């Protein structure tokens, strides 16, 4: 097994374990966090704050490098503009998260744990991604 594949597997296992331990794969806990007007559960704010802090450090470190720690070229996002697709995608993400209590990563963890709601969410998520691709292909075809 090559080092990139092994590294990806290990990081995925650590990420999935973190999602389970933190409660992010539990839709009831997530919906409790999102219920600001009811019985708000602030514990996931600490999880998110920790994730943002780790991300800030990691992206700062990565931005100063040309190669990853495994020797691969760094491929960081370069776009910084806020456009209509970004705003609409963000709104769709937020609505889906609020309705289901899942976002994509935790949904896949819950799917692996056999959570039935995660099956429904994942099918809907994949259908949405497919519909978006079809619309984008048609839009690009019409534009050319």
Image (cartoon, rainbow, N blue to C red):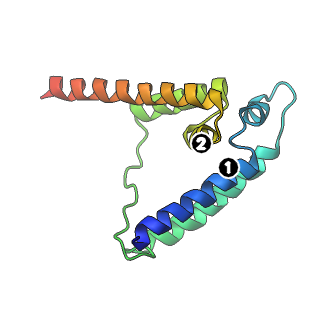
In percent of the image, x 82 and y 42: which residue is there? Answer: 42
**Is 123 in front, or is 78?**
123
In percent of the image, x 46 and y 28: which residue is there? Answer: 88
- Residue 47 percent across, percent down from the top left: 73, 51
- Residue 56 percent across, percent down from the top left: 59, 62
Q: Nearer the viewer, mark 2 or mark 1?
A: 2
For mark 2, what is the residue?
112
For mark 1, what is the residue?
19
Q: Is residue 44 left or right of residue 111?
A: right
Tell me how many marks there are.
Answer: 2
Disc 1 packing (10 Å; few <14; some 14–19; many ≥20):
some
Q: CA distance from mark 2 to mark 1?
A: 12 Å
Q: Is residue 140 left or right of residue 106?
A: left
In percent of the image, x 36 and y 71: which residue is there? Answer: 72
Please say if 44 is above or below 92: below
Please say if 67 is above or below 105: below
**Is 88 in front, or is 13?**
13
Quarter placement of the N terminus: bottom left
- Residue 91 percent across, percent down from the top left: 53, 28
In percent of the image, x 36 and y 24: which residue is there? Answer: 131
Q: Which mark is residue 126?
A: none
* Secondary structure state at the residue bearing disc 1: helix
């Amino acid at each position: 097994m090559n080092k990139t594949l092994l590294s990806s597997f290990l990081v995925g296992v650590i990420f999935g374990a973190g999602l389970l331990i933190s409660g992010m794969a539990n839709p009831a806990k997530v919906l409790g966090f999102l219920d600001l007007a009811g019985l708000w559960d602030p514990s996931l704010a600490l999880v998110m704050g920790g994730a943002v802090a780790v991300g800030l450090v990691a992206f700062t470190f990565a931005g100063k490098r040309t190669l990853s720690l495994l020797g691969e070229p760094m491929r960081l996002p370069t776009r910084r503009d806020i456009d209509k697709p970004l705003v609409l995608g963000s709104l769709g993400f937020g609505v889906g998260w609020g309705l289901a209590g899942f976002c994509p990563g935790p949904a896949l963890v819950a799917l692996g744990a056999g959570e039935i709601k995660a099956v429904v969410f994942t099918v809907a998520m994949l259908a949405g991604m497919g519909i978006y691709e079809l619309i984008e292909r048609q839009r690009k075809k019409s534009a050319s």
